[in-house]
Image (tube, rainbow, N blue to C red):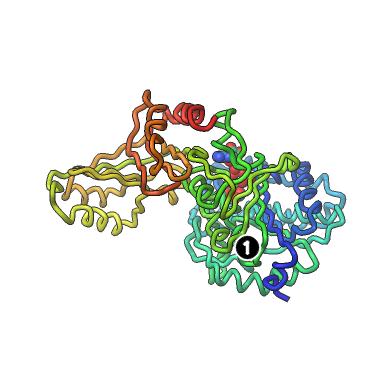
């Protein structure tokens, strides 16, 4: 029987636990308790244990110094051995764990000779392959009917290693075929972040991608709720690491939360809400260390839509300003600029124009968080049309809210609070839910703190 027909009567929860929620034995036990406390939790997607993906990425980049490489491998062994040691029946999973650790050692040696995006994805996927063996065993030892499942049998993607694009229709077909029958009688424990292309290669969805995996699986099985369990009790008015005045938000709309994720709120991978919105699945975010504190519900409609809701910050911005006197009252300049950018597969994020210049920021999705650059060939082509100025050391601040640009006096309120700062490239009015601008990286945190104080406290 497909979950499609049962979902209307039986709630089906897909729960995702991030790296800190499965960091060690104690964290895994806390998360496993959350799973068994709610009988509707049918599918559990987990990340690698905290810190493991970073070590795997370092190994995949190629460490030729064998002592250093050995230290990295030792760190991975210790993380997983400590959990194994605390299991009641470690032998049930120890062979699988040691085989995966051996695979990591040989792939790392290979990466030290020649690294490649394909090898990186294969290597990096081991974090989630390891953690799911241990987490599943913990559930079994709590007498839950749990089964470990290889998500690659369902999570079909294209072949862009490191940022593979999932294929929702195929994922749905495969999930209905392989995953749904298991869910009828068992709790399925599986991996976030990883997938497989049609040739059978392991792929990954990009750093922080487990949130996105969970949303795709929730969509594919017609889940009634997606739960994201992390290290904070919900989505806050801004990153609580920036200001202790940040407050958890009880309820937020899909549109507002999507803006938060897009503009850098690390709590959700930017693509997470796309499947949830497509399939109208409410999303809950809570803390695995303090589930009793409740959390944030993200839904299509919410009771309150405040003018100012929250602030997000994204560092490492690259701003490109293109100036040409020929642009004055001319046509075709922007088309020519974008033709060149498209030729070099450069994706633009924000843009503002004046009579003789256009400023834009470069999309960051391919840089793993670092500042993106313009390839030399693109600069040379652009130089034939206009002057090219590139600035880095900038951060993007986004104010999320509702209908800010239609509300009289809101601009005065916002910009009045920012009198002391130099603001660059302001985008206001294109979306009813955000206003964003660039500031110098050194000012970013104090801009967030000041705006938070003036608009959200
Ligand atoms: P996980 O490993 O569970 O996926 P992440 O580290 O990816 O967890 O995301 C959780 C972190 O996101 C929090 O610890 C917090 O510092 C950060 N964060 C950024 N913006 C926000 C926000 N608006 N609300 C809550 N947390 C945020
Ligand atoms: N383990 C992966 C990472 O650290 C995916 C995730 O945790 O979402 O990026
Ligand atoms: Mg995350």
* The C terminus sits in image quarter: top right
Q: Where is residue 358 in the image (x, y as percent from the top left)?
A: 25, 45
- Is 384 left or right of 260, judged from the image as shown? left
On the question of residue 56 being in view, the answer is no
140 vs 319: above or below: below
Q: Position of residue 97 (x, y in %)?
A: 73, 54
Residue, disc 1 = 217
Per the image, label 1 sits on a secondary structure element best described as helix
* The N terminus sits in image quarter: bottom right
Q: Position of residue 107 (x, y in %)?
A: 59, 55
Please tell me in which quarter of the rendered image ligand 1 is found: top right
Q: Which residue is drawn at 52% across and 32% down?
A: 456
- Is 392 left or right of 300, judged from the image as shown? left
Please name whichever residue, 122 or 340, is drawn nearer the observer in this view of the structure: 340
Q: Which residue is drawn at 60% across and 40% down?
A: 249
The residue positioned farthest toward the bottom in the image shown: 1
Q: Where is residue 429 in the image (x, y as percent from the top left)?
A: 36, 45
Q: Residues within 10 Å of mark 1 (few under 14, many from 20)?
A: many
241 vs 326: above or below: above
Q: Residue at x 41, y 32 (%)?
A: 414
- Is 363 left or right of 198, judged from the image as shown? left
């Amino acid at each position: 029987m497909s979950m499609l027909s049962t979902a209307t009567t039986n709630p089906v929860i897909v729960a995702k636990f991030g790296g800190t929620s499965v960091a060690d034995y104690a964290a895994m036990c806390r998360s496993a308790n959350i799973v068994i406390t709610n009988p509707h939790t049918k599918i559990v997607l987990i990340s690698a244990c905290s810190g493991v993906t970073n070590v795997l990425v370092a190994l995949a980049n190629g460490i030729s110094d064998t002592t250093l490489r050995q230290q990295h491998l030792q760190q991975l062994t210790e993380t997983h051995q400590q959990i194994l040691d605390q299991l009641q029946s470690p032998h049930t999973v120890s062979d699988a764990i040691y085989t995966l650790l051996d695979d990591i050692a040989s792939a790392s040696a290979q990466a030290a000779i020649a690294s490649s995006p394909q090898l990186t994805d294969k290597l990096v996927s081991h974090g989630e392959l390891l953690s799911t063996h241990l987490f599943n065993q913990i559930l079994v030892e709590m007498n839950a009917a749990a089964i470990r499942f290889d998500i690659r049998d369902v999570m079909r993607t294209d072949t862009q290693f490191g940022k593979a694009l999932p294929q929702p229709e195929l994922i749905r077909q495969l999930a209905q075929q392989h995953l749904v029958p298991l869910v009828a009688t068992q709790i399925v424990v599986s991996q976030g972040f990883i997938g497989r292309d049609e040739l059978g290669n392991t792929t990954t969805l990009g750093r922080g991608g487990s949130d996105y995996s969970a949303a795709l699986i929730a969509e594919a099985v017609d889940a009634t709720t997606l739960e994201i369990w992390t290290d904070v009790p919900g989505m806050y008015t801004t990153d609580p690491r920036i200001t202790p005045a940040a407050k958890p938000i009880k309820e937020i709309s899909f549109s507002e939360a999507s803006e938060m994720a897009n503009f850098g709120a690390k709590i959700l991978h930017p693509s997470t809400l796309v499947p949830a919105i497509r399939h109208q699945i409410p999303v809950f975010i809570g803390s695995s260390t303090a589930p009793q504190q409740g959390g944030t519900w993200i839904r299509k409609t919410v009771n309150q839509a405040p003018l100012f809701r929250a602030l997000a910050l994204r560092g490492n911005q690259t701003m490109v300003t293109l100036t040409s006197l020929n642009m004055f009252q001319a046509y075709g300049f922007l088309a020519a600029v974008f033709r060149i950018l498209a030729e070099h597969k450069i994706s633009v994020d924000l843009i503002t124009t004046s009579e003789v210049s256009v400023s834009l920021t470069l999309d960051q999705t391919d840089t793993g968080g670092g500042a993106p650059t313009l390839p030399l060939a693109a600069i040379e082509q652009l130089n034939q049309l206009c002057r090219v100025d590139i600035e880095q050391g900038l951060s993007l601040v986004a104010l999320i809210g509702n209908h800010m640009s239609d509300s009289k006096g809101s601009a005065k309120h916002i910009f009045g609070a920012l009198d002391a700062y130099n603001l660059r490239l302001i985008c206001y009015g294109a979306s009813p839910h955000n206003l964003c601008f660039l500031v110098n990286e050194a000012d970013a945190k104090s801009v967030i703190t000041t705006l938070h104080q003036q608009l959200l406290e």
